[in-house]
Image: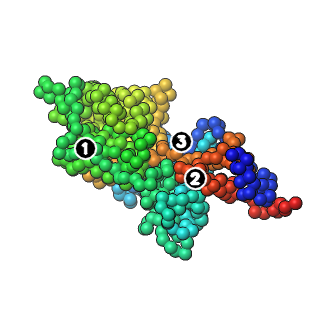
Amino acid sequence: MLRVLARLLCSLLDDRLRVGIRAFLALTLPSIGAAELRAQQDVTFQISYSQTVVGQSVFVLGDIPELGDGDIRRAIKLEPTDWPSWRVAVRIPAGTTYTYSYYRRDDGPGRLGDASNRLLISGPFTASTPPASGSGLPARKAILLHTTLVEPTLMWRTITPAPGPFIASPMREIGPGRTPGERRFVALDIGVGQSTIEFYVVGGGGGGREPAAGTHSTALDGVFVQDSQLFAYVPAASVADWRRDYTTSSLPAIQSQFLFEGGQREWREYRVILPRGYDQHPTRRYPVAYLHDGQNVFESGPFGTWNAHTTAALLTRQGQMRETILVGVDNGPNRLSDYAAPDAGGNANNYVRFLREELMPLINARYRTLTDADNTVAIGSSMGGQVSLYMGWDHSTTFRRIGAFSGAWSVFTSGFYDRVRAQQRRNILLYIDSGDAGTASDNYWPTFNLRDNLLDPQRAASSGGAFVLESNLKHVIGLGQQHNEAAWASRLPDAYRFLLPASADQSLLVLANGTAFDLTGDGQLGIDDLYEQFATPRDLNLDGQITPDDAAFLEWAIRRGEPTNIATPQRP
């Protein structure tokens, strides 16, 4: 068999390729098992400014999303603990060049949405974060496509710090599609790794377009486009949409030994929605998000709905959120007590025992879940926000990703809120938000004060130090929004993208960083890898089969970087 493959190799390669690749192509790949990944950088913005009065703060505004994306209403407030020194640390993608300026703004409820509320203090300044480094980090992106378009061309551009013109990159055919008229194509060396790309595809001679209108946009470094949906892996030929695994007329329920109603053990109802493709991908496992007040999460309850499942479906189609099992946990007759931390006068400890010891084992047994803390999310609003933070703060070994919307921090007492601000930082990913209108301005100041405390650089190193915005803390203000389901639904996409980013699940990364082609494992891309493919064939185009298309794909991947200004070796 090896002799046959060797003869096939020789028949495919002429002397020019054999000599040319060995002489001129030694494309260096990231060394496997090298330094720690560094895809982002923590940047500290600091300024000394004393010309503020109560009701004013210093803000930083930049031309990238992490710094407000040029919109003064979204500028980032600096933390004033050591006034007149103002400071904030923000995580910014590696290899990013950006400009920023400092402004004084009125910071009270209802004022941040006023674009005229601004006084330039200093700037603009230009800065850059170092390029990404470390094993496995791709410098560029890889995009795969199933399409019937003829001679498709990828039109792409990076969109930060500012969108530029679209760049045309012809796509390479690498294998069959799902039907006789469809083929699989790829584009390598696209965009910038770990940054957002905007793209669409056009057929040769203007014959068709993908998507039919608009563009795709994602931070994924390895993307598979199929039926106008984006995937971080090779999807099944047909992928079903998200679906309810319950009927609203007969909700599943579990009787708890920790929750009581009238002295009797309480039955607690719950709702499960499974992500797209759950049934078509039987080997995949999924993170789980537990959402409180389940009556309002998927269906329209007494106070409206979050539409949490339709938002998740949209974001996954767009390649902005991981496929996730969503569990809506209905509230009971003792909602306030269930959701209040013990040192806030409630019994959240019993509610959390119900989740950890009763509901979660049932979910993990019935569904294909990822059970570790880093893949377990708690999301809630108002009192549900308080219990979500309690779950992460006191039970971070179970719940690491926390979404606390419009947290009701001082219901009964402020004991838990005060304790969080005094204790050691927990190893959690925390999203907090509020509106700035309505009763008590939707907890605007308590949430902002919590944010400032968590960012305080004076938090002792022995306490784990401070949080960093866009790293382990995200704070959002719903401008003009009050305390209701419609407001929380509108802010849910921000929380989903932060807590469950699509980039956390990238099985196609091997195409973007080139390791899929390094068959010899020597950190180099060259002719030896092609010999290795014929000796031990692999499915390089990821179509589930080993055919000559795989060797042709590898040959093209090697030759795509071949120098064009070097004389071609002549046949002897």
For residue 155, above or below residue 460? below
Q: What label sits on residue 246 in the rendered view?
A: 1
Measuring 22% from the left and 24% from the top, which residue is drawn there? Answer: 257
Q: Left of 4 or right of it: where is 110? A: left
Q: Which residue is mark 2?
A: 541
The amino acid pointed to by label 3 is: Asp
The amino acid pointed to by label 2 is: Asn
Q: Secondary structure at mark 2?
A: loop
| Structural crowding at the residue carrying mark 3, measured as other residues with C-alpha within 10 Å and reported as few (<14), some (14–19) or many (≥20) | some
| Structural crowding at the residue carrying mark 1, measured as other residues with C-alpha within 10 Å and reported as few (<14), some (14–19) or many (≥20) | few
Q: Nearer the viewer, residue 234 or 59?
A: 234
Residue 375 picture quarter: top left
Q: Secondary structure at mark 3?
A: strand
Which of the two discs, 1 and 3, sits closer to the camera? 1
Q: Which residue is mark 3?
A: 42
Measuring 38% from the left and 44% from the top, which residue is drawn there? Answer: 324
Measuring 44% from the left and 31% from the top, which residue is drawn there? Answer: 427
Q: Earlier in the sequence, mark 3 or mark 2?
A: 3
Distance (Cα) linking label 1 and label 2: 38 Å
The percent position of residue 3, horizontal first and vertical second, equals 73, 47
Residue pushed farthest left? Answer: 262
Q: Earlier in the sequence, mark 1 or mark 3?
A: 3
| Structural crowding at the residue carrying mark 2, measured as other residues with C-alpha within 10 Å and reported as few (<14), some (14–19) or many (≥20) | many
Residue 351 picture quarter: top left
